[in-house]
Image (spheres, rainbow, N blue to C red):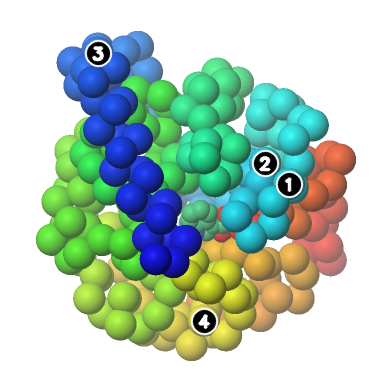
Amino acid sequence: MNLLDQIIASKKREVALKKRVISINQLENSDLFNAKTHSLSKSIINSPFGIIAEHKRRSPSKATINHSLSVEEVANGYQNAGASGISILTDSQYFGGSLEDLIIAKASLNTPLLRKEFIIDEYQILEAKANGADAILLIAAVLSKEEIKSLSEFAHSIALEVLLEVHNLEELEQSIMPSLDIIGVNNRNLKTFEVSLQNSIDLVTQIPTDFVKISESGLNKPEGIELLKSLGFQGFLIGENFMKTDNPGAALEQFINQLKA
Ligand SMILES: O=P(O)(O)OC[C@@H](O)[C@@H](O)c1c[nH]c2ccccc12
């Protein structure tokens, strides 16, 4: 079993347990559930570089990245630096995140928030809304076409946008459908952790124009962003490059300044 299979197997157990602790009714009655959402896709297109900056304490491929800063500090730093969106990893077992991180980020921000999670069940989409997310991630590598359809339509029914992550042409062709807002090409293969910008370069022309296009993972050089932008990407999801510093917000600001230069 590869790591991605292990993550999904433990996610299934986690969701089953959580359903017994917090009911759907409780989620739907939470204050944030009925709060107005902000459009991540619009925020990306309305900005010259559309950077979604990620809060990420650790990852299976890198172990510790940054455990010393509060999510509040990181998220505020990102917002002040001009992030178009902020991605909050909520998986605890492999990434050291939590839904509480999302609530804390939401409390001080008006930048669109992405719940970064391995979503396999509608329950997690309700949780995303109840904890302040504006958008959810769906990963094509772990979902069937039918699942992507029903989960994305469900997200739209509660005013959340959907980022679909693909890693190769097969995944893209199988899963493209109108109920998606943003298509993200992951440069990291979640099964082997290999990173290559070539994934983004190869797939960009295959993504229909009606979707916002973003490139994800392993991005750490302004030149890479400029190249990908010239090929048609409108947004960029970046975590480790900022999180590995003592001041992720300042690192983002510096990165954006280099892009403008
Ligand atoms: O830290 P990086 O290399 O800049 O990558 C950010 C983001 O793309 C990555 O965390 C990610 C992309 N898809 C995911 C799916 C699950 C967990 C994490 C991810």
Callout 2–callout 3 Cβ contact below 8 Å: no
Between 68 and 6, the one nearer to me in the picture: 6
Give the Cα distance between marks 1 and 4: 26 Å
Q: Which callout, 1 or 3, points at the residue further toward the start of the chain? A: 3
Callout 1–callout 2 Cβ contact below 8 Å: yes
| Mark number, residue 64 | 1
Left or right of 193: which side holds 5? left
User: Disc 1 vs disc 3: which is toward the camera?
Assistant: 1
Where is residue 248? Give x, y as percent.
78, 43
Tag 3: amino acid: Gln
Q: Which callout, 2 or 3, points at the residue further toward the start of the chain? A: 3
Query: What residue sits 43% from the left and 26% below the top?
Result: 132
Q: Is residue 212 visible?
A: no
The picture quadrant where one finds residue 213 is bottom left
User: Which residue position is annotated with label 2?
Assistant: 57
Tag 1: amino acid: Thr
Tag 2: amino acid: Arg
Give the Cα distance between marks 4 and 2: 25 Å
Q: Secondary structure at mark 4?
A: helix
Give the Cα distance between marks 3 and 4: 41 Å
Where is residue 150? Give x, y as percent.
14, 51
| Mark number, residue 26 | 3
| Mark number, residue 199 | 4
Query: What residue sits 17% from the left and 56% below the top?
Result: 147
Query: What residue sits 55% from the left and 64% below the top?
Result: 216
Q: Secondary structure at mark 3?
A: helix
Where is residue 198? Give x, y as percent.
57, 85
Q: Which callout, 4 or 2, points at the residue further toward the start of the chain? A: 2
Give ligand 1's quarter of the image. Answer: bottom right
